[in-house]
Structure formats: C-alpha cells, structure tokens
C-alpha cells in the first residue's frame, strides 16, 4: 500500500502532449517540425559562422545578432527533440528531473532572448538618435559586460523555479499541456497550495518579459520621434528600414509569449489546441 501511495503522490514521469485528435497523422506532423529544426540549427549556425569569420562584421550590431542566434540555437536544441520524440516514436514520457531541467533551460533561454531583443533595441536607439557617439558607447567590452549581466539575471531569476517545484508532491493526472515542460504547466499538477508560486511566477514575468517589452516600446517611441524630425523623406525611410527585422523578431517572440502566459494564468478553460499551437509558435517561431 505504501508503494502505491508513493507512486500516486510522486509520479516518476510526466506525460507530454501532442496535438489532440491527430494521432493517426503523427508521421506527417513530424515533417514540418523536422524542417523547422534543421532550418533553425543550420540557419543560426551559418549566422554565427559568418560573423565569426568576417572581420567586417565584428561590430556591435552583429555581435548582438550572434548572441541572439546562439540563444535561438539553445531554444531549438532544448525543445524540439522531445516534440519529435512524440511524433516520430510516440515517446511521451519524461522523468521529473529531465522535465525540471528542460523547464529551467526553456525559461532561462526565453529570458535571455528577451534581454537580447532589448539590447538590440538599445543598439538601434543609439545608432539613430546619437550616431556620433555610437562607437564610443557600444564598445565590445561593454557589450560583453551587458551580456554577462543578462546571463546572470536569467540564472538568478529562473533557478528558483525547478527548486520550488521539486518540493511538491504531484497527486493529479501527470499529463502536461505541451510537448515540453513549462513552469505554469507543471505547477498546476501539484497537490498543494500554489498561491505563492503563482504570485512569484507572475512577478518574475513582470520583472523580465513585461519590463523588457516596455523598455523596447519606449526605445521605439524615442526612435520614431527622432526619425520624424529628419527633414529628408528618404533618410527617414532608411533609418526606419534598419529597425524592421528587429521589430518583426520582437512581435514573433512577445505576442505568443504574452498570450500563453495570460491563458495559463487567467483563462484555464481555453482550448487545449489553442494552448499547444501558441506554445509551438512561441518556442519555434523566433529561432526559425
């Protein structure tokens, strides 16, 4: 009886979830995931190779781009293998420790990605609003220090998540909502009061993703103000063109992330299919 209770309250594994109702076409579903995986790995690796081998690209904008590409490589390697395991081999089980480890790296890399996008917005702000001081403000040693700070911030903020979850017993159905592990998803399976965890998770989200997105928004407000003061219409368009790719990356990253966070915390009766699709867009879109 004690062994049964121990199994009931401390499951050895969680079960990952595929797209519901599509079990008969798993092989076909795996094809786009394989393409996304290969494209993300090869594309970001080529970016890193090009920046490393071309001395003319050893400038702040491209150094920041290489840091973003490295983060995206980590996101792809962390998430897509478990997804492919489901659709290719029907491997839905993941141990608690493996799940907590994957969860830490997903949230850590997402925090890192957010910080990289903020640093790139700061780069565009300096380049457009204060171009004469660009080289003296964004020196390579300063960028390295900024990178170290955001890495330390990510570790300090995200490391408590798996430590908090390891304290819980899990007595509910140990089936997750995605094909990878997220903090909000695991937390709901605990047979304990998770009020503190909810508040802590929301506070961390506000302190990282929401704060970063607010600062990016303010950067672009000042960029737009500076650009509109340019007399030449062509110069105005040229300045805005340097921001287009970054703005697209910001939208692709933040929109699904905010939607997924709000759904997990405040709209728990939402369609599982909606949660799964948003989750895939959130984690696979930016690296791709």
Image (spheres, rainbow, N blue to C red):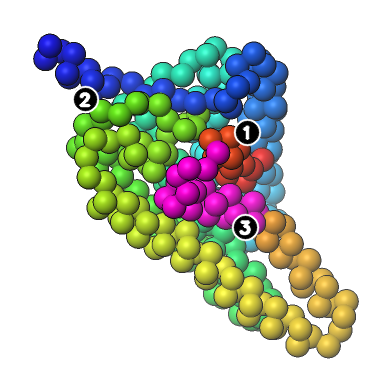
* Disc 1 versus disc 2: nearer the observer: 2
Q: Which mark is residue 33?
A: none
Magenta stretch bounds: 249-271
Name the residue located 27 percent from the left edge and 22 percent from the top edge. 11
- Could you tell me how far apart the alpha carbons at marks 1 and 3 are, in whole angstroms? 20 Å
The residue that mark 3 highlights is 250
Q: Is residue 268 inside the magenta stretch? A: yes
Q: Is residue 219 left or right of residue 15?
A: right
Tell me, yes or no, if residue 65 can be seen here. no
The residue that mark 1 highlights is 41
Q: Dominant secondary structure of the magenta stretch?
A: helix
Q: Quadrant of the N terminus?
A: top left
Q: Is residue 109 left or right of residue 217?
A: left
Name the residue located 41 percent from the left edge and 62 percent from the top edge. 206
Name the residue located 83 percent from the left edge and 78 percent from the top edge. 235
Disc 1 crowd, CA 10 A, few/some/many (<14, 14-19, 20+):
many
Of the image marks 1 and 3, the number of the one nearer the N terminus: 1
Name the residue located 62 percent from the left edge and 42 percent from the top edge. 281
Badge 2 element? helix
- Vertical comparison of 277 with 173: above or below: below
Q: Is residue 246 inside the magenta stretch? A: no
Q: Is residue 161 left or right of residue 51?
A: left
């Amino acid at each position: 009886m004690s062994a049964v209770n121990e199994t009931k309250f401390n499951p050895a594994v969680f079960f990952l979830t595929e797209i519901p109702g599509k079990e008969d076409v798993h092989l076909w579903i795996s094809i786009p995931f394989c393409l996304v995986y290969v494209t993300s790995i090869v594309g970001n690796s080529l970016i890193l190779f090009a920046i490393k081998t071309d001395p003319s690209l050893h400038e702040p904008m491209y150094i920041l781009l290489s840091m973003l590409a490295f983060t995206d490589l980590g996101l792809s390697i962390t998430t897509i293998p478990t997804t492919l395991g489901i659709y290719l081999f029907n491997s839905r089980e993941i141990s608690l420790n493996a799940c907590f480890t994957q969860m830490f790296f997903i949230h850590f890399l997402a925090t890192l990605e957010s910080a990289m996008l903020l640093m790139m917005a700061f780069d565009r702000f300096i380049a457009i609003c204060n171009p004469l001081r660009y080289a003296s403000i964004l020196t390579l040693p300063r960028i390295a220090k900024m990178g170290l700070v955001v890495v330390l911030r990510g570790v300090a903020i995200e490391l408590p998540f798996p430590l908090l979850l390891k304290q819980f017993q899990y007595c509910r159905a140990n089936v997750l909502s995605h094909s990878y592990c997220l903090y909000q998803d695991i937390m709901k399976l605990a047979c304990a009061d998770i009020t503190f965890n909810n508040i802590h998770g929301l506070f961390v989200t506000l302190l990282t993703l929401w704060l970063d997105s607010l600062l990016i928004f303010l950067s672009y407000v000042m960029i737009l103000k500076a650009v509109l003061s340019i007399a030449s219409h062509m110069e105005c368009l040229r300045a805005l063109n340097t921001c287009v790719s970054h703005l697209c990356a910001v939208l692709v990253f933040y929109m699904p992330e905010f939607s997924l966070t709000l759904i997990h915390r405040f709209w728990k009766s939402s369609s599982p299919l909606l949660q799964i699709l948003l989750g895939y867009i959130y984690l696979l879109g930016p690296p791709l």
